[in-house]
Amino acid sequence: MKRRWLHIAVLASLLVPISSAVVAQETTGIQTLLDERVAAVVEGDEDRFIATLDPSQPEFVERQRLLFKGMHSLDISGYSLKVELEDLPDLVREVDHDKYKAPVSIRWVKEHFSLDGFDQERAINDLFFTFVKRPKGWLIASDTDVEDLGLLSSRTIWDFGEVATHASEHFLVLSHPDFADKAKELPGIAEKALARVGKAWNGEWIKKVPLVVPSSSAELDRMTGGTVDVDKFVAFASYSVERDVPDLYQAVGYRVVVNPARFFSSSAELTLAHELVHIATRPASGPLIPIFLDEGLAQLSEIGDVAAVTRRAKSVGDGDLPEDHEFVSGTQRSINSAYDEALSAMLFLRELKGPGSVEALYRALGKAQGLGGTAEYHLDRALRETTGMSLGAFEEAWKKW
């Protein structure tokens, strides 16, 4: 399953208005504080890092201490923090002033970093920091005060403690020490899975991927933002979208994150192959790719006996391509059915137009960026371009198949 880690916009009417002069002054002080935090991270100075935090919030301070130690279990470079001003205003509300009894500003902060040797482009985390002004200046007091607005600060595995690593030529496995014995098996399994990607995708991609193993479903749930029932899935391909680039869509920070409760009892090689296809297709992807195309394509990497799978695929589907929500909500059976239908549609397309037809359709849709029209319109257009069939004609032919 693929997932995008994105922030959610909020209504400005919920927020406390502040004059532009005050905003400019606050922003300068807040960015100076963030620069101090960056310097502490780069230098590995824990005391300096803790000094950027509000000591009146001891639980937050201890959680940040855990984050600092976890982060320094890894080789991280290109670290930066920047307060964002254009897309979201100050998120502070009256309740926040009442809570801290001090000047308060809640800001969206972008965190950039690279895992050395694996991130070609810097990964992105979205953080929603509460800044309070104490006698000595601005300090960070929380990163959870706007969770009730649906704005969750990103969580990585090092937010939850020390990180153990295992590496191979193409993979870096990140786990906590309690899962290190199981995690050390993954580089070998992943290298075998890598060879299966070509069954589904022949395009060029950077074959360097971190694999993340949380210690519990609860940890995984927080890392994914709590937007799906993680117990229904074995693994996720995750990435962020870099918006501050000339291109309209650039996926960065590729990761495969496994569900520890299910992954190690599953067919791990096939699961990883599936998720690696999601990673491999990112350079050709775009915001209008429907989930059935993403998931159907990824499942092509898992099949062995194509003829047998094709015969079975002809027994599924109601003639309607599954909609995006069907892959993430509903019963386990209904979610599985959506995946079966997606694979069926891709096998039909391959049989109809040849082995390269699925990739051709994917690329045609991935190019549709910044254009007017609905997702259905662009799917119809891409099908006409690559198969000569309209969306309606494709669905009707698939139904007869």
Image (cartoon, rainbow, N blue to C red):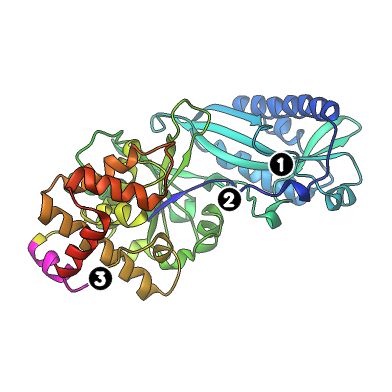
Q: Name the residue under label 1.
A: 129
Query: Closer to the camera: disc 2 or disc 1?
Result: 1
Q: Where is residue 137 in the image (x, y as percent from the top left)?
A: 85, 30
- The front one of 8 and 142 is 8
Position of 165 compared to 222: left or right?
Answer: left
Q: In this view, does 97 lie to the left or right of 70?
A: right
Quarter of image, res 255? top left
Which corner quadrant holds the C terminus? Answer: bottom left
Specify the segment rendered in magenta: 307-318
Alpha-carbon span between mark 3 and mark 1: 46 Å
Q: What element carries label 3?
A: loop
Q: Which numbered disc, 2 or 3, marks the residue that appears first in the sequence?
A: 2
Q: Is residue 339 left or right of residue 360?
A: right
Amino acid type for the residue under numbered disc 2: Phe
- Using the rendered view, name the quadrant where residue 333 is placed: bottom left
Instruction: Provide the residue designation for mark 3.
Output: 317
